Amino acid sequence: MKKTIFFSLIGLVVLVILLGGIKGLQIKSMIAQGEQMAPPPTPVTTAAVNSARWSMALTAVGSLEAVQGVTVTAEISGKVTRIEFEAGRAVARGDLLVQQDVSTETAQMRSAQASMELARLNLKRARELLPENVITRANFDTVEAAFKQAAAQVDTIRATIAKKTIRAPFAGRLGLRQVNLGQNLSEGDPIVVLQSMDPIFVNFQLPQQELALIKRGLTVNVTTDALPGETVAGRITAINPVVDRATRNIRVQATMVNPEEHLRPGMFVRVAVALPTIREVLAIPATAVLYAPYSDSVFVVEPAPADGKAGKGSVVRQQFIRLGEKRGDFIAIASGLKAGEVVVSTGAFKLRNGQPVVVDNSLAPDFTLTPKPEEG
């Protein structure tokens, strides 16, 4: 009985060892097959690293400012009797905005004009009598002075009426109304903001070391989030003669046409000053770059090594690079690539170093230096 149990246990152990050996051989075979199996190549679009001639540009951030801008205020105290403008409308120079009460001045004007007319007649008679020595020269001077005083009184009242008749000092666009009908305005009370919109200034600052590169007349290209995909051109019209002591920057002003008034004073803009100097750069599509805090990189497409698992196809190699200026859909490469190399232009984020790929540019996007977004 004991011998039977003993032999049964031995047989069971042998069976377990045999099954374990068979399973181990199967796993080893599967591992070997997995090592020999290459993943299918990933389709990618590519672009060549091309040498291009780019005009140099100085970039900065700036803000827009009206060529003429003012808050129209009351010059003298008075009650508002008429409001002749609508908020947000364009006005011409001299258009009536607000009329203050001038009833008292109008009455005073009639009296002053009557006094001036009487003084004029007296002066006329005095001129006729003076050559005949009917009146003395002193009397003539008194009559003449009386006429001038009467005329001055008329001019004073007329100036008061003009100050209470508030007109647009220049052509532009009005802001929000800040007065109401019947309101008593004091001297200096705001009425409405008036801004000249076309042309418009853009103010920006450049480092002092760039002073030798800039001059009046250079083209300035301005972009803003308010006009996506559009570039507005202008020209440098003024360079501040004083360098800021705190920042060592110099303030520059450019003027741009703004017929549709899409650009408004106070807006933030990006500025690029086009310089006449041309330089050679290596450019690739900006979509090819993998941006990272430690270093930016691209994937270079190369023939697969002869002893590799990718066969005779292509593989990608991650290459770290240093970036330069961005222009349109392209970005300049300061170092890390050579002309003629081919990089993955889209979808680089899904690749890994050494991964087999197949090039398919049938759906590759068109890259340009002056992209224009399609209208939806």
Image (tube, grey):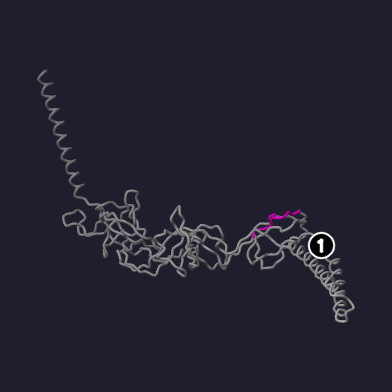
Q: Is residue 188 magenta?
A: yes
Query: Residues in magenta?
Result: 184-193
Residue nearest the viewer, comparing 5 with 94: 94
**For numbered disc 1, what is the local secondary structure?**
helix
Residue nearest the viewer, comparing 338 with 79: 79
Where is residue 372? Give x, y as percent: 45, 65
Where is residue 271? Give x, y as percent: 46, 61
Disc 1 marks which residue?
Answer: 105
Where is residue 10? Give x, y as percent: 11, 26
Where is residue 207? Give x, y as percent: 42, 58
Quadrant assignment, res 331: bottom left
Quadrant assignment, res 347: bottom left
Quarter of the image where the N terminus is located: top left
View extreme (bottom): residue:
132
Identify the amino acid type marked 1: Glu
Magenta stretch, main secondary structure, is strand
Q: What residue sits 44% from the left and 59% below the top?
A: 206
View extreme (right): residue:
134
Quadrant assignment, res 179: bottom right
- Residue 375 versus residue 138 in the image, above or below: above
Mark 1 neighbour density, 10 Å: few (under 14) some (14–19) many (20 or more): some
Q: What is the total number of numbered labels drawn onto the structure image?
A: 1
Q: What residue sits 36% from the left and 67% below the top?
A: 54
Tell me: 134 left or right of 195: right
Residue nearest the viewer, comparing 244 with 322: 244
Residue nearest the viewer, comparing 182 with 294: 182
